[in-house]
Image: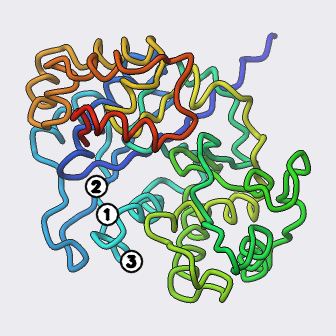
Amino acid sequence: MAQKPPTPQTVNILIIGQSGRLQHEALLFAASLSASGSDPARFRLFVAEPQPGPLWPNDPRMSADVRAELEHMGATILPFDSQHFGHAYPQGNKIEALAQLPADQPFVFFDSDTLILGDLVQVPFDFDRPSASLRRENTWPEIELYGPGYSATWKSLYDKFGLEFESSLDPDWPDEYWRRYLYFNAGFFFYRCPQVFGARFLEYALAIRDDAPPELVCQSLDPWLDQVALPLVIHGLGGGRDTLPAGLLDGAVSCHYRTLPLLYAREADAVVEVLEQISAPHRLKKLLKRHEAMKRMIYQGRGQKVRALFDRDDLPRKEKAIRNRIRREGFWMR
């Protein structure tokens, strides 16, 4: 008798949803996931929502109609209490929310300002070897003229947590060039267990925030704390920079667009088409239009005006230059 094929692994997808811009980005993410062809029984969407508490001066919860629409699209809302970060460092939401996901089940975290463009089954995740987004610039550390260099700065962190440093280096790049050092954008990351990953992420982030090595004395950790701790977590759990094929996440299957002006300025035509198709239905449109940037960029045509400013085949090398051009034209919005 022929054996039945193994049951496909269920993967939990986690994003953050809270009042303001993020709840509207969460709607776009959920709509794009629904339209992507990804099997909702295999890729289950969870939207983590911070709850009111002493670390939030205002209520961070999503509006009731946004929450209802997310549930209508198949998402599960995960309330969580902010115990360490909150309003002072909202990027910490992604760290604290991991504890709410079921233990011992593989997960992928995505920043809410992401669109899913294709079926996630195309991505050959190795959940035993975590990784994160390599779509990043050399934002941290900022090297001072008479301060420690990249090697001394990063090695001080590996030493602090008892991690082996040399194996994290990319030998294809020279000493003191930023790409030699393990550094990610925290726009996505994954592992086999959110509880293990989240506990270590929290431990490292708090230790860096509260008791950083002296080599970091001149370094800013806001907003970079999550991206400073993340490579240490990934390296310590046996992952690295090359555990996923290039061109899928941050490519053909997902797009971390960051802001709508940047999306319209630099992303491929297919990304714009997905955005405008998923945002067209009336039930979503009436919610998304409440956010000024989405109203103007998507529904009033400002995004296409931004798009006309740039040649996607000849974009400025630095994101800052793209942002500055959009600002000069009066089109920048978040």
Q: Quadrant of residue 45?
A: top left
185 on left or right of 89: right
Image location (x, y in percent) of residue 192: 65, 49
Query: Which is more N-terminal, label 2 or label 3?
Result: 2
Report if the CB atoms under discs 1 and 3 are less than 8 Å apart.
no
Residue pictured at 32% horizontal, 32% vertical? 261
Tell me the amino acid under the disc marked 1: Phe
For disc 1, the marked residue is: 80
Task: Relative to 310, say whether 334 is above or below.
Answer: below
Q: Earlier in the sequence, mark 1 or mark 2?
A: 2
In x, y percent, where is residue 64? 10, 45
Q: Estimate the x, y position of residue 284 in percent, counting from the top left.
A: 16, 24
Packing grade of label 1 (10 A; few <14, some 14-19, many >=20) is: some
Q: Is residue 161 left or right of residue 173?
A: left
Q: Residue 136 location in percent, x, y?
A: 59, 45
Disc 2 is placed on an element classified as strand
In the picture, the disc for residue 211 is none
Which residue position holds label 3? 84
- Residue at the location (51% across, 68% down)? 225
| Quadrant location, the N terminus | top right
